[in-house]
Structure formats: structure tokens, C-alpha cells
Image (cartoon, rainbow, N blue to C red):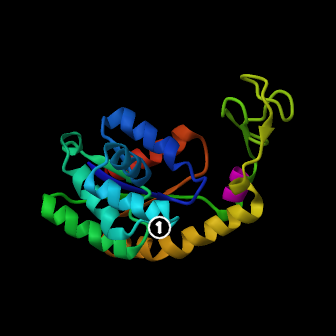
């Protein structure tokens, strides 16, 4: 089963991906992880990506697509995989389709976890991180026992720069601008499965399983 997971920042994609990985024993393919591995292994594509990253530039689509093609050809992807964070644009989706044709693969489902923007702002801007051990809390959903203090190690909790409300709203706008055409693209292909992202983690996971198992 080959899946693409879509959803705005804070929609809970990472949590749901982990449950899918555990149940179906398939790898999660993240462009960030692939880039880090290619850099560490000093592969040809990894070195090419490094040239752009060293200049603070975005790694071009053709390099990312090359990395994805190498990754999807590996043995652990034979039973299936979850693509997370890719594709982000219609252009990338079209390039991915060519790669899949070449590998004799196809995407079975594109699952979009749908959460209202105001809810995403609430989720992301309420996050607090421990400076010492990195533990995560939330002022509304998982508050520390003592305000501003980590339950785990007693370290100071802080709000990351990219979790303030203005930055969160900008991130959501970028996601919407990039992804709305992508949702339309997969809807026309009959692959899009929309899942409400509200409720408990298990509720949302139950909805995802229902749409991918038909």
C-alpha cells in the first residue's frame, strides 16, 4: 500500500504516520530524512544537494526527485510506503508520477487530514518546548504541572519562534497556496481521501483506516 499523507502544519500527520508504520510495517519516506542520509553517505545527489543547502538555497525539484527515485527502489518499499512532505506542488506530483511509472509503482491513496485553520493556530501557538531535554507540552492540551517548567527534567519551557501566532498563520497560508492545487489534482485522479482531523488520535486513525481499506 503506497500512501501520500497531506495536512497542514499541526494537523497531526506525524502521529498518524507513526501508527500506520507500526500497523502496516511500511517505511515513512520524508524528504528531510532522505536529504540527511544522502549528505551523511556523501552520495552524488547528496553532494549536489549540499551545494544548494550551503548557499541557503532550496534544493531543486530534480535533485529531490532523484533522491525519491533511489529511495523508492529500495527493498523495504516493496510492501508499500508513506510519502510525507512530498509532493508539495502539482509540478512535483507530475514528476513523482513519472518516477512511479518507471519503477512500475502507483499511489493507492492520498489521505488529507483536514483541520480548521483556527484550530491549527490554537494547536501550534500553544506548544512549549523544554530548553534542556526537548520534551513538548501544550498550554491547553498537555499543560505542564507547573507553568513554564518541564515535568520531565525541571528545565525551562519556551515557545519556539516558528510557533508564534503570526508565523503559524504565514505557514498555513504557504501550505494552502501550495497544496490547494495538489488536492484538486489528486481529486481529479480519484485518489484523494479526506479525513476530519478533530477528535482523539484513535478516532482520527480509525477514519484513516476506514478510507484506505475501502
Residue appearing at x 62%, y 66% in the figure: 172
As displayed, is residue 191 above or below residue 39? below
Q: Which residue lies furthest to the right in this view?
A: 147
What main secondary structure does the magenta stretch of the protein show?
helix
Count of numbered labels shown in the rendering: 1
Residue appearing at x 40%, y 57% in the figure: 50
Q: Seen in the image, is 47 located left or right of residue 208?
A: left
Residue appearing at x 76%, y 47% in the figure: 159
As displayed, is residue 60 above or below residue 12? below
Residue 173 x %, y %: 62, 71
Residue 22 in magenta? no
Splitting the image into 4 quarters, where does residue 149 fall? top right
Give the magenta-colored segment's residue range: 120-124
Q: Residue furthest top?
A: 153
Residue 108 visible in the current orientation: no
Residue appearing at x 55%, y 68% in the figure: 175
As displayed, is residue 210 above or below residue 162? above
Residue 32 x %, y %: 44, 51
Splitting the image into 4 quarters, where does residue 106 fall? bottom left
Residue under circle 1? 58
Q: What element carries label 1?
A: loop
Residue 85 x %, y %: 44, 57
Q: Which of 164 and 118 is in front in this view?
A: 164
* Disc 1: CA contacts within 10 A as few (<14), some (14-19) or many (>=20): few
Q: Seen in the image, is 160 located left or right of residue 50?
A: right
Q: Seen in the image, is 3 located left or right of residue 198?
A: left
Residue 214 x %, y %: 31, 52
Q: Which of 188 and 5 is in front in this view?
A: 5
Amino acid at each position: 500500500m503506497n500512501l501520500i499523507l497531506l495536512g497542514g502544519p499541526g494537523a497531526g500527520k506525524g502521529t498518524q504516520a507513526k501508527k500506520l508504520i507500526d500497523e502496516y510495517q511500511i517505511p515513512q519516506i520524508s524528504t528531510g530524512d532522505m536529504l540527511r542520509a544522502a549528505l551523511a553517505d556523501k552520495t552524488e545527489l547528496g553532494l549536489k544537494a549540499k551545494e544548494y543547502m550551503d548557499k541557503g538555497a532550496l534544493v531543486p525539484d530534480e535533485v529531490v526527485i532523484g533522491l525519491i527515485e533511489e529511495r523508492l527502489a529500495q527493498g523495504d518499499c516493496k510492501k508499500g510506503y508513506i510519502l510525507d512532505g512530498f509532493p508539495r506542488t502539482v509540478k512535483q506530483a507530475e514528476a513523482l508520477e513519472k518516477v512511479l511509472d518507471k519503477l512500475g509503482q502507483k499511489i493507492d491513496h492520498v489521505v488529507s487530514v483536514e483541520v480548521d485553520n483556527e484550530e491549527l493556530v490554537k494547536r501550534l501557538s500553544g506548544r512549549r518546548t523544554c530548553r534542556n531535554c526537548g520534551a513538548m507540552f501544550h498550554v491547553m492540551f498537555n499543560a505542564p504541572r507547573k507553568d513554564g517548567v518541564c515535568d520531565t527534567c525541571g528545565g525551562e519551557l519556551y515557545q519556539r519562534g516558528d510557533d508564534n501566532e503570526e508565523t503559524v498563520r504565514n505557514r498555513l497560508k504557504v501550505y494552502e497556496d501550495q497544496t490547494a492545487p495538489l488536492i484538486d489534482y489528486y481529486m481529479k485522479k480519484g485518489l484523494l481521501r479526506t479525513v476530519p482531523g478533530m477528535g482523539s488520535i484513535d478516532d482520527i486513525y480509525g477514519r484513516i483506516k476506514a478510507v484506505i481499506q475501502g
